[in-house]
Amino acid sequence: MFNLLWPTRCLICLQTVAATHPIEHLCSGCLNILPWNTPACARCAQPLPSTQPYCAHCLKNPMPQQRTYIVFHYTPPISDWIHAAKFGASFIHCRLLSQLLSHTLARRSTPWPQCILPIPLHPRRLRQRGYNQAIEIARPLCHRFDIPMDIRSLLRHRYNQPQSKLALKERKNNVRDSFQLQQPLAVSHIALLDDVSTSGNTLEAASRALLMQGPLELEYWCIAKPF
Ligand SMILES: [Zn+2]
Ligand SMILES: [Zn+2]
C-alpha cells in the first residue's frame, strides 16, 4: 500500500523502481552503468584485463586473505553514496551499499564465511559519529545470508587520524597495531567488512590482530577502492 502511494524512485534517473527489484533505490538501467570492479583478481580484487583468476602479484606473494570482494571503483556516484553513509548518517545509503555488495556476493560458489566482522571504529570515533557504517552495511547481509556478525572479538584501541587525510606512505604507520583481539575466535573462516579500502592497510592491520591466535581463512569485503 505504502509503495503504491509513494513508489520508490531510482536515485540516479528518478524512474519508478518496481517493488520486486533486488536493489530498492536503483533501476536496472542505472545498476548496469555503475563503476563495477570486474574482472578482478579473486584474491586481492585488483582490476584485471581478462577473467584470469589471480593477478601476477598474488601469484608470487602470499597475502593474509584468501579472497577479496571490492565491488566498485571509488568514483561517483559510489563515492558520494559512501560519503553520505559515512558522514551524513544516511541509513538509506548504508542499506543501498549493502544491497549492492549482496548482489555481488550472491553469485559466489565457494563456501560462505562463518561470521562477518565489520572493521570497528575507535570507541571515541564511534561516540562522535553515533554509529559504525560498516556495521550498518553488514547487518542486512547477515540477515540475507544467515551469517552471524561479530562485533566483540576485535577492538580498535588506537585512535588514528582518518586514513583519508594522510599521504599513502603515512597510512601504514597510522593504523599499524591499531587492533587487538579481545576474545578467542570461535570460528576459522571470517569475512572482514569495510566500506572503503584505500591502501589496504586497515584490513591488513585487522588481519594481523586476528591471526595472532593462529591460522584463519580470511576474506575482505569492501564496497569500493580508488584503484
Ligand atoms: Zn535509474
Ligand atoms: Zn591479486
Image (tube, rainbow, N blue to C red):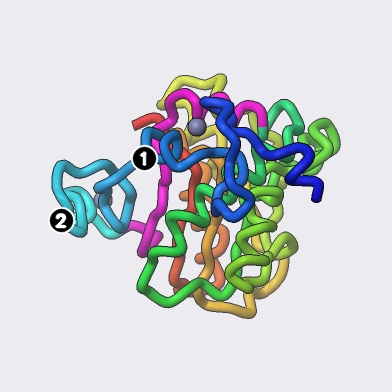
The amino acid type of the residue labelled 2 equals Gln
**Secondary structure at numbered mark 2:** loop
User: From the viewer's perspective, is residue 127 above or below residue 215?
Assistant: above
Image position, residue 53 (x, y; %): 20, 59
Q: Which mark is residue 36?
A: 1
Query: How far apart are the two marked residues, 1 and 2, measured between alpha carbons?
Result: 17 Å
- Label 1 vs 2, first from the N-terminus: 1
Image position, residue 153 (x, y; %): 69, 64
Asked whether residue 83 is in view, the answer is yes
The amino acid type of the residue labelled 1 equals Trp
Mark 1: few, some, or many residues within 10 Å (few <14, many ≥20)?
some
Disc 2: which residue: 52
The magenta stretch is 63-84
Image position, residue 113 (x, y; %): 51, 72
User: From the viewer's perspective, is residue 145 above or below residue 225?
Assistant: below
**Secondary structure at numbered mark 1:** loop
Mark 2: few, some, or many residues within 10 Å (few <14, many ≥20)?
few
Asked whether residue 177 is in view, the answer is no
Image point (56%, 31%), residue name? 15
Question: The C terminus is located in which quarter?
Answer: top left
Image position, residue 151 (x, y; %): 72, 60
